[in-house]
Image (spheres, helix red, strand yellow):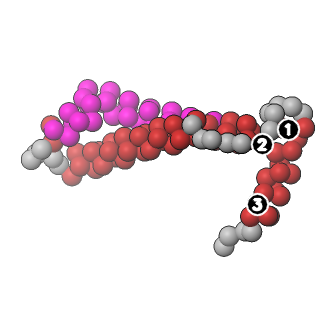
């Protein structure tokens, strides 16, 4: 079920108004961009750590690990590979999202 946009924006305005009123942020655009970037950076740290942990565990990059499994991967190796692939994929997605937010043309 989706709420009408007027309800969502009204609720958001009530929640964020004190941050604007107290000059923590100059306007809603700055506030929303800050909140988004804070969340995005948390996601980036999560996936950077996961990728780093896989690299440390295997002493290989994802690409080298992939090549090392060709024709000889066990079920455990394949599960590990899928988890690592997901982490790499989500890291790239969050990097792209961050770039989009940083370059968003807000009024």
Q: Which residue is drawn at 51% across and 33% down?
A: 45
Residue 2, magenta (yes or no): no
User: In the drawing, does residue 86 fall left or right of residue 95?
Assistant: left
Secondary structure under badge 3? helix
The label shown at residue 20 is 1
Q: Position of residue 21 (x, y in %)?
A: 90, 38
Q: Disc 2 vs disc 1: Cβ atoms closer than 8 Å?
A: yes
Q: Distance between the residues labelled 3 and 1?
A: 18 Å
Q: Position of residue 58 (x, y in %)?
A: 26, 31
- Which residue is labeled 2 in the image? 28
- On the rendered image, what quadrant is the N terminus found in? bottom right
Q: Residue at x 21, y 52 (%)?
A: 75
Q: In which quarter of the image is residue 23?
A: top right
Mark toward the start of the polypeptide (2 vs 1): 1
Which region of the structure is painted magenta? Answer: 38-67
Is 75 drawn above or below residue 84 in the view shown?
Answer: below
Mark 2 vs mark 3: in front: 2
């Amino acid at each position: 079920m989706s709420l009408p946009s007027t309800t969502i924006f009204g609720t958001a305005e009530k929640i964020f108004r004190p941050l604007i009123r107290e000059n923590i942020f100059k306007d809603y655009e700055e506030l929303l961009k800050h909140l988004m970037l804070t969340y995005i950076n948390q996601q980036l740290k999560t996936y950077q750590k996961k990728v780093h942990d896989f690299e440390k565990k295997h002493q290989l990059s994802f690409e080298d690990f992939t090549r090392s499994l060709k024709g000889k991967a066990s079920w455990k190796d394949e599960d590990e590979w899928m988890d690592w692939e997901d982490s790499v994929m989500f890291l790239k997605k969050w990097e792209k999202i961050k770039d989009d937010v940083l370059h968003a043309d807000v009024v």
